[in-house]
Image: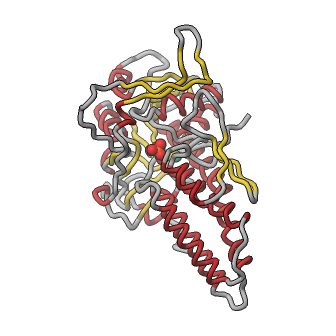
Amino acid sequence: MVLQAIRYQPGRLQILDQLKLPHQEVYDEIRNAQDGWHAIKDMRTRGAPAIAIVAALSLAVELQNNALSDRAEEVAAFIVEKLDYLVTSRPTAVNLADAARKLKQVVSAVSSVNGCGGAAVRQAYCDAAARMLIDDVADNEAIGRYGAEWIIKTAGNGGGLSVVTHCNTGSLATAGYGTALGVIRSLHAMGELKRAFCTETRPYNQGSRLTAFELVHDKIPATLVTDSMVSALLRLKGPSERIAAIVVGADRVAANGDTANKIGTYQLAIVAKAHGLSFLVAAPRTTIDLQTKSGADIVIEERAPQEMTRVKGPRFDGVDLDLSRTETVSIAATGIDVWNPAFDVTPANLIDGIITEVGVVEKNKNGMFDLAAIMPPQE
Ligand code: MRU
């Protein structure tokens, strides 16, 4: 069965509650933009592409299920106000702001047509939001293919390749298939993957909870390591441990290629460089932000200290897990100060390639990524 974090049909949106994974698969009903905002803020849904799509669709179902004005400009103003609100849920991933900008353009174009009514504006909005869900899966499949081909070409494929990844970039973080995890899925489908190594990804554990869940679900040979084990892993010489590349996702790629991604990504890029290993970023073009010149301009979200100082999980009596009872336990000294940035920025000079749905961008002869060259014209 294909993993589906976002279930949408006109009038109905459900998200897989990622706070309950990997132990329980529970879908939450999202009825409006406010539900969408909270699902994103609480990280019941997460991952740069997924939060953009859930935000867009949460407003679509609100428009579909409620009476609206007949006046196009009133419906357009309502949509713009809700989109501005949705964008405040999480700041670092650009996909959400990018989706809101594109949806506003759609609404503005339709509502300015003479004689257009409120229903036509709603229809245009909902069609555009639904299209984002469909396009994201196709983009991810292309990213997976391009990334896998690049790795095979660069590392050679005698005996299969192993890859390290960080955070969760799979079906749970996107509309389906995934970006960096899409590359791993493609390598596996091509019969070229020896093993995927996924980091635990402290403090929120997207790796051990979510990526591990996806890899087990898809029966992809995989091993979990803590974030601090990757350097040691790269020194191993066994056949499974001969790592071909480290592949990660992105929340925002600046115009110069500097990349914000899950905290811990930067240290993996340094480790890759120290071991002469390829370090790749896999992201759709909706994650590339030409307006942000470099990583220094990216706002990094800081999250609650409790995400670091506490862990939550099903009760364990020493033999069995009791999935009906969740416990939260403290794992840090009470009173300690906490710094909990959700993301870090990897400088472009540590990145070997940016895998997009239109191909892998490598640095030019001046050592720069020319990302403008692959971007679609501004709608
Ligand atoms: O805080 P999260 O879980 O939303 O962070 C997710 C990541 O950093 C992912 O690597 C990134 O969004 C890419 S998802 C395809």
Residue in view at x 74 percent, y 59 percent: 11
**Residue at image point 41% right, 56% down:** 91
Residue 166 placed where, x, y %?
A: 44, 35
Viewer-proximal residue among 28 and 347: 28
Which residue is located at x 75 percent, y 55 percent? Answer: 9
Identify the residue shown where x is 34% and y is 21%.
Answer: 232
What's the coloring here?
A: secondary structure
Residue 56 against residue 326 in the figure, above or below = below
Residue 181 relative to residue 238: left or right:
right
Which quadrant of the figure has residue 124?
bottom right
Quick check: 215 left or right of 348? right
Question: Is residue 127 in view from this perspective?
Answer: no
Residue 51 screen position, x and y as percent: 54, 52
The x and y percentages for residue 192 are: 59, 30
> Residue 32, percent across and down?
63, 59
Is 55 drawn above or below residue 122 in the view shown? above
In the rendered image, the residue lying farthest to the top is: 319
Left or right side of 151 for 217:
right
Quadrant including the N terminus:
top right
Count of numbered badges drawn on the protein: 0
Task: In the rendered view, tell whether residue 231 sits above or below residue 368.
Answer: above
Can you see residue 242? yes
Q: Quadrant of the C terminus?
A: bottom right
Looking at the image, residue 143 sits to the left or right of residue 204; the answer is right
